[in-house]
Image: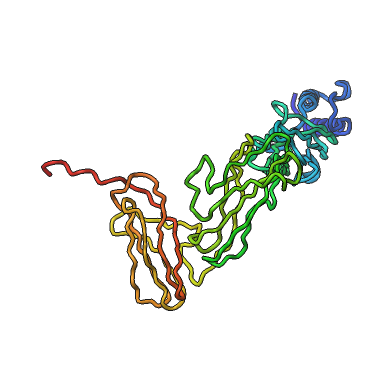
Amino acid sequence: MKLRSGHIAILVLALIGGFVIFAVTWKPGATTAPPAADLPPGAQANADFLKTVHEEQEKTPMQAGVGSILPGGADEGGPRIEIPTLDLDVGLMPNDALGRYQMPVKNTGNLPLQVQQVTTSCECTRGEVPPGGFTLPPGGEGTIEIIVDPYRIPGFEATRHLTIKSTDPITPFLEFNVTSHITPEFSLEPESFDFGTVEKGAPAALTMRIRQLRDEAVVVDKADGHGPFDPSVDRGDFEAEVTPVPEDQWQQAGKAEYDLTVRLKDTVPIGKLDTRVYLLNNVKRIQALPLKVTAEITAPYSVEPALGDVLGVPNKADMRATIKVSGTDGIAIENVVVKPELFSATVRDEDEATAAYIDVELNLNAPAGAIRDFVHFDVVADGKRYSERTDAHAVGVGPPAAAASGE
């Protein structure tokens, strides 16, 4: 039988009619296909395939995130994570046990939200979710437990940075801060030593009153410029003295008090001072409590590199680093002191009335590894003598290997 043009036209019309019937009868999201009797030949296979696809979609809801396409665009749908604030204050926490705070988390989107993980900048303040996280339906609400470990916080207050990982396609990593306040074992008045602006060489002293708050005795032994774990921090910028307050002057009977006095030394370098004094006491959680000591030290000259900056000394022969002191006419440098086993230092005369220089070289016989020490010197300016120092760092390569005999 030959196919004539009329037969072909009838076949095309049948296929078009079948497609129209299918398009009219099928609805998005339908899990059942139209009855086979209503479908033209050949359309049943398409209906069966679509039925299978829709059933799989029902069993596996679409997950937002990489590789997903949200209905109507990402800004019109999908899961959305919401927390009460990006700067959370969990209030007063105990000083002898873990503190816990339940932070609400909402899904304000129109698809399920998976809260997967919470990371932290410090284990002293962390967020916990069940293993594998949890899922919130649209409009649902859950909680993340904030846990504060007072034994990991060296003081009475801490602000840490936490991040929630979720399937929110707009904010998959939600960052927020958590501030906690630890119930103090003793009070500090004032809470730090801020000297403000101090002329170098002028007397400067501040006193802090320490008052016991807990029932157990608080004993303050001493204070110094370094903690028990990093003695290298002590630079000798100040003197610290602890004095017990007479019992008849205590604010509350049975609660001991102490005075901590910090005096700046004449040798404190000019510039911005930002260091710590450590209060050594018998409170197990904070046996070496760091307290801030700040000041702005002024003088009729400047030093480069300044306090807090580092003089990097090269570890090759005939190479040096330079300290520059600038000031008024007639400024001079005297009495330069370094450890000869580490460095050598020479005052350089450049014929400049308002500047003087120190050239510092590494002793090539210095031990291998990181070297950190100071260059001490006196500055004479405006008829006065000032003691100064600069940090000097280098990397030693070790003494040269002895030449082999006979070479």
Residue 110 vs residue 349, the one in the foreground: 349
Residue 68 occupies quadrant:
top right
Residue 59, percent from left and from top:
78, 24
Instruction: Decide: is 173 above or below 352.
Output: above
Q: x, y percentage for residue 185?
A: 70, 39
- Say which quadrant the N terminus sits in: top right
Name the residue nearer the viewer: 15 or 210.
210
* Residue drawn at x 74%, y 26% as measured from the top left: 2
Along the line of sight, the residue nearer the viewer: 216 or 190? 216
Q: Is residue 243 found left or right of 252 in the rendered image? A: left
> Residue 89's x, y, as percent?
76, 44
The one nearer the camera, 94 or 287, is 287
Seen in the image, is 35 located left or right of residue 254?
right
Residue 19 position, x and y percent, is: 83, 32
Q: Residue furthest left?
A: 406
Whether residue 71 is visible here, answered yes or no, is no
What residue is rendered at 73% in x and 38% in y? 254
Left or right of 265? Residue 38 is: right
Tell me the quarter of the image containing the C terminus: top left
Colouring convention used in this rendered image of the protein: rainbow
How many labels were placed on the picture? Answer: 0
Residue 62 lies in what quarter of the image? top right
- Residue drawn at x 46%, y 72% is 384
Drawn side of residue 135 relative to residue 257, left or right: right
Residue 258 appears in view: yes
Identify which residue is drawn at 69% across, 53% down.
Answer: 190
